[in-house]
Image (tube, rainbow, N blue to C red):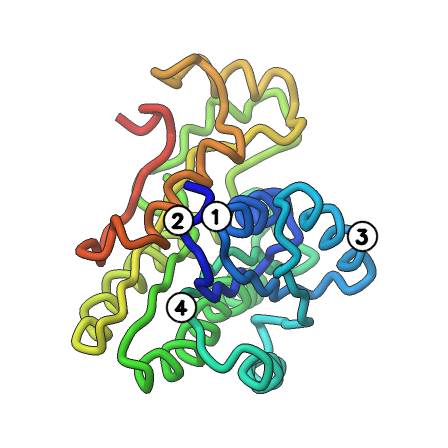
Amino acid sequence: MSNYLLDKKIIISGGLGLIGTKFVEVCASCGAYVTIADINIDMSNSIVDNLKEKSGNHNIFFQYCDITDPDTINEFLSTYTKKHHTVDALVNNAYPRNRNYGRKFEDVTYEDFCQNLSMHLGGYFYMSKAVALMMMKQRCGNIVNMASIYGFSAPRFDIYRGTNMTMPIEYAAIKGGIISLTKYLASYLGEYNIRVNAISPGGVETNQNESFIKKYSSRVLLGNRMAQTEDISGALIFLLGDHSKYITGHNIIIDGGWSL
């Protein structure tokens, strides 16, 4: 698998985050040229250097990109194209949200609801459209969108009781929208030989409340545990490579059986 993505040029939005850094690492480990599109300029150098060391691949690049702003997306792609000329794949992985995101249903305002949908789902639309226009000229390409099990199944609120956590209503609407966006784009872009798929992970363990982890894990069929980033990255590599060249419009569920 070390050359499975050899010389493929891949853009990963949100590539400096928890899941994003794992995606960058495994893509680079498989021989890809990886460009990180992210807003975290301050941490970019140290994270990129660490990823180069972990992957054994120095073809990892950072460019500032705010997916909620079409102008910065255009600037990003202008700079990217001058350096790399073509793009093989886009991974929409960024997770933009406003300062009020994460409130309980009773406390969510209409303005916050709309703003968070615009930032996250709208950001995936902006990024997908801009990159798809490049891919349409190439008549080939690959887009992978990060969705969630909460994009197609209802939250189980009992696992949040006794914690300060909840499942925001915006999140469910956004992720459901991403799954539908994926199917739309797969249908529309298919004639250009552009594949579009989604990945829907279950909960990823990130030092959450111990009670939440225990309740969540008890519902998981495989191993009674939450997901780790490496559980998700294998599906991404598969979707980015040629072994999945006849797959489009699908939503790959990675939750250890939690949603069954």
Q: Do the CB atoms of the residues marked 1 and 3 lie less than 8 Å apart?
A: no
Residue position marked by numbered label 2 in the rendering = 4
| Residue receiving disc 3 | 46
> In terms of secondary structure, where does tag 3 sit?
helix
* Place of residue 44 in the rendered image (x, y in percent of width and height, measured from the top left): 76, 59
What amino acid type is highlighted by mark number 3? Ser
N-terminal of the pair, mark 4 or mark 3, is 3
The residue tagged 1 is 30
Count neighbours of disc 2 (C-alpha within 10 A) and say few if under 14, some if 14 to 19, many if 20 or more.
some
The residue lying toward the viewer, choosing from 217 and 129, is 129
Q: Secondary structure at mark 1?
A: loop
Residue 1 in the image: state x and y as whole percent: 41, 41
Question: Answer yes or no: do the residues labelled 2 and 1 have beta carbons within 8 Å?
Answer: yes
Is residue 195 something one can see in this rendering? yes
Residue annotated with mark 4: 88
Looking at the image, is mark 1 or mark 4 nearer the viewer? 1
Residue 36 in the image: above or below residue 171? below
Horizontal arrangement in the rendering, residue 21 relative to residue 223 (left or right): right
Residues tagged 4 and 3 counted as in contact (Cβ below 8 A): no
Label 2 and label 1: CA atoms lie apart by: 5 Å
Horizontal and vertical percent position of residue 34? 56, 61
Q: CA distance from mark 1 to mark 4?
A: 14 Å
Pick whichever, 93 or 84, lies toward us: 84
Viewer-proximal residue among 135 and 205: 135
Residue 105 makes an appearance in the image:
no
Three-letter amino acid code of the residue under disc 4: Asp
